[in-house]
Amino acid sequence: MPDGMNIDYDGLIPNNVGLNADARVRKALETWHPGYIDWWKDMGPEGFQDSLVYLRTAIGVDPKGWAKFDYVKMPEYKWGILLAPAVPDRKIPFGKHKGEPVWQEVPGEYRAMLRRLITVQGDTEPASVEQQRHLGTTAPSLYDLRNLFQVNVEEGRHLWSMVYLLHKYFGTEGREEAEELLARRSGHQDTPRMLGAFNEATPDWLSFFMFTFFTDRDGKMQLEALAQSGFDPLSRTCRFMLTEEAHHMFVGDSGVQRVVERTVEAMQQAGITDAHDIAGVRKLGVIDLPTIQKKINLHFSLTLDLFGNEISTNAANAFNAGIKGRYREDKLEDDHQLLEATYPVLRHVGGDFITEDVPALSALNLRLRNDYVQDCNSGITRWNRVIEKAGIDFRLALPHVAFNRHIGEFAAIHTDIAGQIIDDAAWAKLQDHVLPNQGDADYITSLMVAVTEPGAFAGWIAAPRVGIDNKPGDFEYVQVVA
Ligand code: BYC
Ligand code: FE
Ligand code: FE
């Protein structure tokens, strides 16, 4: 089935990659499958493995109807391997092979690079499931509980997508990487996940919404860059993953917005106009806007680290090779090789910030990060509209890109949220005011109480405007089995 439109939905592993005709890969994946299910049961959503969840399952790749909704127990979710349809006569869109036919097999010289990128991508997917595994017990509604589980099963499917590529194209080494993807653990001292932000805790639901807004959005950007790849199976896999990613963005974006809505509504009802009256606002049982800002500061800065170093030879090599492109490379108008181009990079030199023009090839991580920041700002603008409409004099904002960084140009310095460089002592004093502190964590934790009655919502979050799959407000999205 070369066009990838025929779905085999009946076997153990639903797929449109012709697994039936590929005994070697099918056997490899069937051998990997029990370990995956063990991992899911050990590290997936705690306490809900037997519950019936109203989930969408990807059953095809036609943009008009690729999913169906039904009640399923999560361990029985059909994690399929689905590639977006092949683009006929597709050519490598960038780099030194630009214009050559895309690769259907891994080019030998780029094998190690591709394996590393696919493994890093794969590692983030189960990591996020692990980070979110305790959240089910404190969900603010069945609607939110279901959205959490939807995100979780799809991140599981994203792992399958990368594991398929590893087994199909990388032989013994690929098989070993696939095993290790099930062995690493988020936050584990000896066997942590590969990238920093995926070893952080997701302690509460506001963090979950921030994570899906900020960190899943890094996923979106990276997948967009990999969807441009000259290695066509990777491109097609990522293109299909992006259709699922849109829902993860929605969960984060609308989740934070509903928290903001509820906060300003409670403030209005109580006649509080000063957003900085934290004690007053907290008495209302909602999350004060300054604490929401602190969560933004934390999740934004942690996620910026995921873009790697601003100036990166890895990124230049991957672009030159035609393996990892820019955000929406196919919509950009230049030579797609960047042989002469430069790109301005904000650098930290001798205690000061300077903007330096560097070869554009070496600044590709930063370029993707800049596109990401722009994408984040659209959400912030929407949230601010809610605050503005309520007549409250407070605006959320992204902190400066140098704030609280651990990778890249700014890793060695401290700044305030406006990007003013400060010394260690000043940073020690500032931290509690710009990042969630113990008191903030304790307060938010005190609000995290499960609401399991259909149609009901915890007092700190507004109801969504519409249901999932157009279901009515009191729909029982999760049938909890204790
Ligand atoms: N933590 O040239 P450099 C998602 C390492 S999220 C630890 O700066 P490069 C999702 C780097 O590995 C998207 N180490 O970086 C979201 C390198 O090590 P080696 C995930 C880091 O390679 C939510 C060294 O520093 N996908 O899907 O240009 C829920 C110097 O490297 C970090 C991808 O990331 C870090 N933060 O860029 C679920 C796409 N940053 O090789 C899922 C694939 C850098 O010298 N990955 N290092 O030992 C990549 O494209 C690249 O690996 C990175 C790093 C952009 C991450
Ligand atoms: Fe994902
Ligand atoms: Fe995601």
Image: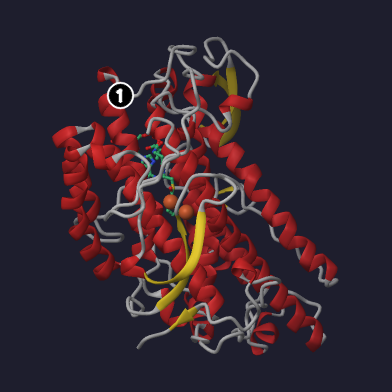
Q: Tell me the quarter of the picture where residue 309 sits.
A: top left
Q: How is the image coloured?
A: secondary structure
Q: Tell me the quarter of the picture where residue 250 sits.
A: bottom right
In this view, 429 is above or below 91? below
Q: Is residue 331 left or right of residue 151?
A: right
Q: Position of residue 318 (x, y in %)?
A: 40, 24
Position of the C terminus by quadrant: bottom left
In this view, 315 is above or below 6? above
Q: Position of residue 230 (x, y in %)?
A: 42, 23
Is residue 130 in sight in this rendering? yes
In this view, 144 is above or below 162? below
In this view, 482 is above or below 300? below
Is residue 426 in sight in this rendering? no
Q: Which residue is nearer to you in this view: 180 or 84?
A: 84
Q: Residue at horizontal 21%, vertical 65%? A: 38
Q: Residue at horizontal 43%, vertical 67%? A: 202
Mark 1: secondary structure: loop
Give the residue type at disc 1.
Glu
